[in-house]
Image: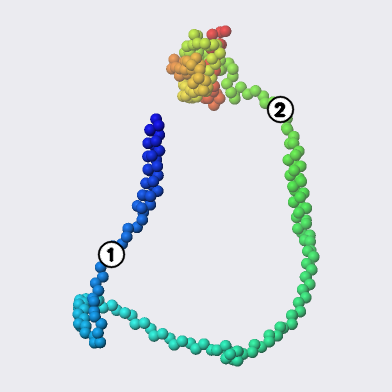
Amino acid sequence: MRNGFVGSALLHIGVIFIAYYGVPALFEPSPGEDHPIVVDLVTISHETNLPAPSPPPEKPAPKPAAETRTASLPEAAPPVPVPSPERTREKAPETPETVVPPPRPKAKPKPKAKPKPVVADPFASVLKTVEKFQAEQKETAAATPTPQVLQAPKRFDPATTLTLSELDAIRSQISRCWNVPVGAKNAENLVVDIRVHVNPDGTIREARILDTERMQRDSFFRTAAESAYRAVINPRCSPLRLPPEKYEQWKTFTLSFNPKEMLGT
């Protein structure tokens, strides 16, 4: 173990030595290369005896450059003579003194003209009075209830409408063709009203069930209404036995089919 510790210490010391002395040498610039210089040795004498220098080599003739058009520059304008400050002082005209005019007196405001008194138009006042009176009369008439005229009860006229006995006669005539729905739920409460239009000879021209909404939601009522409708248009129960002189009264009437009355309950 002691040998390993000594070896490790020596290794660390060697690494530190190389890093301290070897690494900076890597970044030092390399010395430049030496270039030889040719020197002619000449002896010094009273007379100069040197060979004539060799003529320089002829340079190749330059290629003719493309003619460039140069725009003629305008001739510079002659400089404007700057007057000396002394002359400008001598030639400077004297500025005349400005005379401030006195302020004008303010004009007095004109007095406002007084408005002329409006003369009341007597005719207009009369019209307003009449309109006001008419409006009051209308309000009074609207507030006052109109008295109701008591009319005497009309006497019964047998020629105006069908009598109860005539309707019973029609009902009894058509009931022979009506099959009462005995097995239906609450059959005694299924009252069917049919609007009937009759020809002058007593035949049925048109029949229409009035309560169509109940037919859509109540199946038992629909069965009773359809059976009553078939009884009205059944040719076995037509023509109706009605007085011809009362055709204007019985040409249109409403016939009620009550199973409770037909069953005798």
Q: In the image, is residue 120 above or below residue 234?
A: below
Q: Position of residue 203 (x, y in %)?
A: 46, 21
From the viewer's perspective, tell me whether residue 190 is left or right of residue 156: left
Between 183 and 239, the residue placed more toward the observer is 183
Between 72 and 140, the residue placed more toward the observer is 72
Between 63 and 252, the residue placed more toward the observer is 63
Q: Residue at x 64, y 89 (%)?
A: 94
The secondary element bearing badge 2 is classed as loop
Q: Is there a contact, CB below 8 Å, between mark 2 and mark 1?
A: no
The residue under label 2 is which amino acid type? Ala
C-alpha separation, residue under disc 2 versus residue under disc 1 = 157 Å
Q: Position of residue 58 (x, y in %)?
A: 20, 78
Q: How many C-alpha atoms fall within 10 Å of the one at disc 1: few (<14), some, or many (≥20)?
A: few
The secondary element bearing badge 1 is classed as loop
Image mark for residue 152: 2
Which quarter of the rendering shows the N terminus?
Answer: top left
Q: In the image, is residue 253 above or below residue 67?
A: above
Q: Residue at x 23, y 76 (%)?
A: 40
Which quarter of the rendering shows the C terminus?
Answer: top right
**Residue 174 visible in the picture:** no
Between 109 and 203, the residue placed more toward the observer is 109
Mark 1, residue position: 34
Colouring style: rainbow
The residue under label 1 is which amino acid type? Asp
From the viewer's perspective, tell me whether residue 38 is left or right of residue 136: left
